[in-house]
Amino acid sequence: MTLYVDPPDWPGHGRMWSHLVSDVSYDELHAFAARLSLPRRAFDGDHYDLPANRYADAVAAGAVEVGSRDVVRLLRESGLRRPKGLRPRRG
């Protein structure tokens, strides 16, 4: 099981954010996020939005640090990438 996280370089809501992804399955991603106590509302269709203050927690839990372009590449290659317009709405 490998999860990936990019650097917290994405601004939003007065914070910086990372993206947490799996290249295997959404089930794997949700299980890892649950271990980090990330709220399900942080799931954005094919990744979790991870605040900068939780980046080190994700890495300590086993997420592999990759660049932002790598996150997109990994999602595409795995078939898990969902274009923004096709992602389920957050609930």
Image (cartoon, helix red, strand yellow):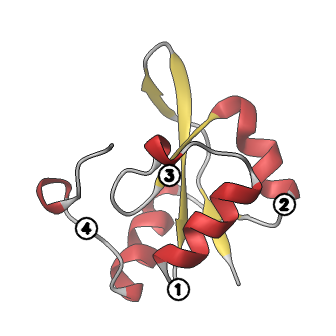
Q: Residues within 10 Å of mark 4 (few under 14, many from 20)?
A: some
The residue carrying mark 4 is 82
Q: How far apart are marks 4 and 2 (CA)?
A: 25 Å
The residue carrying mark 1 is 24
Q: Do the residues labelled 1 and 4 touch (CB within 8 Å)?
A: no
Q: Distance between the residues labelled 3 and 4?
A: 13 Å
Q: Which of marks 2 and 3 is nearer the N terminus?
A: 3
> Is 87 in front, or is 11?
87
Q: How far apart are marks 1 and 2 (CA)?
A: 17 Å
Q: Which of marks 1 and 4 is nearer the N terminus?
A: 1
The residue carrying mark 2 is 61
Q: How crowded is mark 1: few (under 14 residues within 10 Å), some or many (20 or more)?
A: some
Q: What residue type is labelled 1?
A: Val
Q: Which amino acid does label 2 sit on?
A: Ala
The residue carrying mark 3 is 48
Q: How far apart are marks 1 and 3 (CA)?
A: 15 Å
Q: Is residue 79 left or right of residue 74?
A: left
Residue in the picture at 54% in, 35% down: 17
Q: Earlier in the sequence, mark 1 or mark 2?
A: 1
- Does 10 appear above or below 19? above
Q: Which amino acid does label 3 sit on?
A: Tyr
Please tell me in which quadrant of the rendered image residue 51 appears.
top right
> Is 88 in front, or is 1?
88
Q: Residues within 10 Å of mark 3 (few under 14, many from 20)?
A: many
Q: Name the secondary structure under disc 3.
A: strand
> Is 81 in front, or is 35?
35
Q: Which of marks 3 and 4 is nearer the N terminus?
A: 3
